[in-house]
Amino acid sequence: MNIFCLVSAVLTVAYGSSALRAALARAGSRAPSPAGAVRSADSLVTGYRHWTRVNRTPHAVSSYLALLCRSITPEDLKADSANPHLYTFGDDPLFREKFVTVYVNKTAERAMLYERKPMFPFGSVIVKEKLSTRTSVSPELLTVMRKREPGYDSAGGDWEYIVMDGAGKVTRAQGRLQNCQSCHAQWKRTDYVSRAYLGADVTRSLR
């Protein structure tokens, strides 16, 4: 083998090794999550309508809360700074009254429906359907609260917040969402969960 062939062979092996390392690195970045890792948001809410429904009829919420429970856009911020009557009801569809229907998984059921001062256990999931009208069949948005492991967010009750499209397929925002945290901070005594949508009969029976 002449010197040219030898150098060419060495360079080929060297390049192949670096390319292989790069390929392995890329594959590692796409490797599936280990067993026990956090589930993706879409699989988390699959079949949620078969869970326990908390309120029998859709609960009306102010436009202020409706705005907080979705991703804030630059247009929203502009309207916020320019409109002193942002949180009053009117003809603008963005600021009309909204309605919610709430579902909980089995893990969250006892805390939601039976405990006056609830402490939701790890794995609790609360799904809130945002409805444009009281008679809407399909939600325009899903907002989800998931109780994560201790230490995930100790100052916020270890809740993770997720905003999804109405079909529960597209995640628009997920994590320690500041706008959600700032709103839910007022309900610290009930583990950062409002429960304003509980019926009067359920509220009276809380222990």
Image (tube, grey):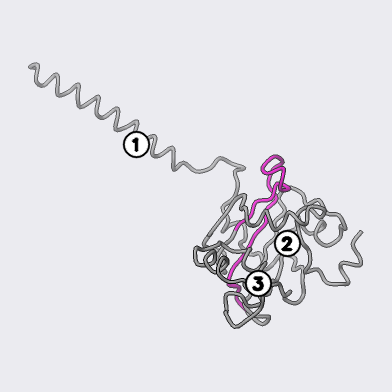
What percent of the width, then of the height, locates residue 116? 88, 58
Assess disc 3: are there few (<14), some (14-19) or many (≥20) residues with their C-alpha within 10 Å of its C-alpha. some
Q: Which residues are magenta?
A: 137-162
Of circles 1 and 3, the one toward us is 3
Residue 138 inside the magenta-drawn segment: yes
Mark 1 and mark 3 lie on one chain; the one further toward the N terminus is 1
Q: Regarding mark 2 in the picture, which secondary structure is present there?
A: strand
The quadrant holding residue 190 is bottom right
Q: Along the line of sight, which residue is nearer the eye, 6 or 96?
A: 96
Quadrant in which the C terminus appears: bottom right
Q: Quadrant of the N terminus?
A: top left
**Alpha carbon separation for disc pair 1 and 3:** 53 Å
Q: Is residue 132 left or right of residue 6?
A: right
> Which callout, 2 or 3, points at the residue further toward the start of the chain?
3
Residue 23 is labelled as 1
Q: Secondary structure at mark 1?
A: helix
Question: Residue flagged by tag 2: what amino acid is it?
Answer: Val
Residue that mark 2 sits on: 104
130 lies above or below 15: below
Work out how far the residue at label 2 is from the one at label 3, CA to CA, in angstroms.
29 Å
Q: Answer with mark 2 or mark 1, whichever residue precedes in sequence.
A: 1
Q: Amino acid at mark 1?
A: Ala
| Up-down relation of residue 154 to residue 102 (above or below) | above
Kind of residue at disc 3: Tyr
According to the image, label 3 marks what residue? 87
